[in-house]
Image (cartoon, helix red, strand yellow):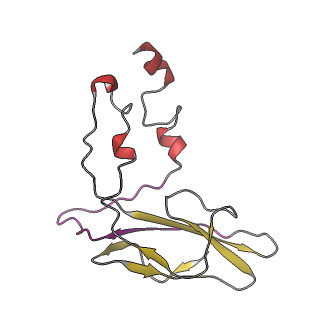
Amino acid sequence: MPEASLPGGYYENDVTLELNAPPYGKIYYTTDGSAPSKNSIPYDGGIRITDRSDEPNVYHSIQNVVKDWKEYTPDPTPVKKGTVIRAVYISDWGSRSEILTQTYFVGLQPPEHGYTLSLVFEDEDVFGEDGIYVTGKAYDAWY
C-alpha cells in the first residue's frame, strides 16, 4: 500500500502530500473518494491539498434524500468540505496493493467537542437510483 507523508486530519494552510511505494510499479490516486485504478491520476509528484469550502456543493444539494423532496430546496450556501485521497500501488506485473485512504480538512478547525467521521463510498451506492440514502424509484414514481 502506498505511504502518505502526512496523516489525514486538519491543517491550517494548504499542504502538499507525497506518496511513496516500492519501485517497479506505479501509484494511481483519486481526489474525489472513488476507488483508484489504472485509469485514475498517475502519481508523479506532490499532491496539493487546499481548502475546498468555496467549491459547489454536490451531496448537500441532492433533493431526493427527504420524504417530501419536491417541496424541499437545499440551502445553496457552500458547506465545509474535505479532500479524500485514495491511492493504490500497481506493480509492473499487475499486482495491486490495498487502497490507502486519507481525508484532509484544510482551513477548518476540528470540532471542539466530539470527533470527525469521514465516510468513503462510491457515489452510486449511496445516491444512485438504488442508493441507500435516496427515496428510491418506487417512492419517486408514487410521489
The residue located at (52%, 32%) in the rendering is 129
Left/right placement of residue 140 relative to residue 70 reads right
As drawn, 17 above or below 73: below
Q: What are the residue bounds of the magenta stretch? A: 97-120
- Name the residue nearer the viewer: 85 or 120: 85
The residue located at (33%, 23%) in the rendering is 70
As drawn, 64 above or below 139: below
Which residue of the protein is positioned furthest toward the left in this rendering? 112
Residue 117 falls within the magenta-colored stretch: yes
Left/right placement of residue 29 relative to residue 24 reads left
Left/right placement of residue 74 relative to residue 20 reads left
- Prevailing secondary structure of the magenta residues: loop
The residue located at (39%, 30%) in the rendering is 64
As drawn, 108 above or below 120: below
Image coordinates for residue 86, horizontal then vertical, percent: 54, 66
Which residue of the protein is positioned furthest toward the bottom in this rendering? 23
Image coordinates for residue 35, horizontal then vertical, percent: 59, 58
Image coordinates for residue 20, horizontal then vertical, percent: 59, 83
Give the total number of marks visible in the rendering. Answer: 0
Image coordinates for residue 8, horizontal then vertical, percent: 40, 72
Res. 67 in view? no
The N terminus lies in which quarter of the figure?
A: bottom right
The residue located at (47%, 16%) in the rendering is 141
The image quarter in which residue 105 lies: bottom left
Which residue of the protein is positioned furthest toward the right in this rendering? 93
The image quarter in which residue 29 lies: bottom right
The image quarter in which residue 66 lies: top left
Res. 119 in view? yes
